Image: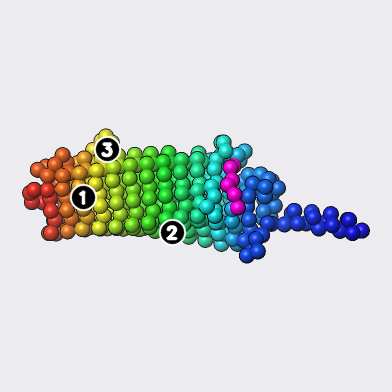
Amino acid sequence: MKNAFRVALALLLLAAPAEAVDGVIEINEARVAAGGITPGDTPGYPVLLSQPGSYRLTGNLVASGATDALQISANDVELDLNGFAVSNGGGVSYGIVALPGTSNPAVRNGTVRDFLSVGVALQTAFAPVILDVVVVGNGDGLRCGDCVVRGVRALSNNLSGIACESDCEVRESAALGNASEGILLSAGGVVDGCVSTGNGLNGIRAIAGATVTGSTSSGNGLAGIDAGPGCLVRGNSVHGNGTGAGPFRSGIIAASGCAVLENSVRGNALQGLSAADATVGYTGNVFTDNNTGDAAQQVGGLATDLGQNICGNHACP
């Protein structure tokens, strides 16, 4: 009787989630192989996080044989990578995915690498948070919407580094050496205190209505900052961009209704500022050594000079 009880107890313990003393559910390769991390989680990949709560890696994960490595299907899931990496072991499209309709997922403190489509894919969730994560060698490094991104490093991804679909805050993050856009904001949002360097297309591209402040964009293939209609571009350092080919290689490109204020713009392949029309206003900027040198035109287009600008060795524009 006692032996039967012990066997039943052992089976129960194996089926239960592995919880640390602080109530956090721990995830490692052994637990992945066993399955049952949450209800509905089958052995192997993908790992399904189907209940709200906190989860923590206790080792590296190398995913194979599935479309995704980890799937978040519940609201209010916090996934702490705990300094470990989630990697593609072969043929896996997505690293960490929040399924449609979920809200408040958070991913923090680790590395996601080499996934074919997206490293961290939270664009179908509401109000995700991504903190202190490195995304490297993926298709897109990170995709999200209505999100907070802080302390992220997007390195050498095959498409964009950080791609935000609406009203995101991207702060204190870096996009380095990605093949397409460094940081992309599709609609609204804020980029603040970021670095975007050596990307194949634009360093920072804001489609419309965004704010780009206090950031450095350098050595990118096209523009340092490509700002769509109604953007605010203020207090940035934009230099050495336009290393690729084509006509869109200015330091800052500004569409209708943009305000371009107090930026330092130097050494870009074409003009320091290329403006769509007279609804673009600019003031307090320093444009030097753009468009082959200080003697060349530093500001192109019909932008409205609001004063206190420096344009090489001659008056603006």
Magenta residues span: 58-63
Which of the image's four quarters has the N terminus?
Answer: bottom right
Q: Would residue 62 be counted in the magenta stretch?
A: yes
- Mark linked to residue 243: 3
Quarter assignment of residue 62 = top right
Q: Residues within 10 Å of mark 1 (few under 14, many from 20)?
A: many
Task: Give the residue type that dot 2 points to.
Answer: Val
Q: Residues within 10 Å of mark 2 (few under 14, many from 20)?
A: many
Rendering coords of residue 212 (x, y %): 30, 56
The residue at the point 26 percent across, 55 percent down is: 236
How far apart in space, not on screen, are marks 1 and 3 (Cα)? Answer: 15 Å
User: What residue sits right under mark 2 in the picture?
Assistant: 148
Task: Give the residue type that dot 3 points to.
Answer: Thr
Q: Secondary structure at mark 3?
A: loop
Task: Give the residue type that dot 1 points to.
Answer: Val
Q: Residues within 10 Å of mark 3 (few under 14, many from 20)?
A: some
User: What residue sits right under mark 1 in the picture?
Assistant: 265
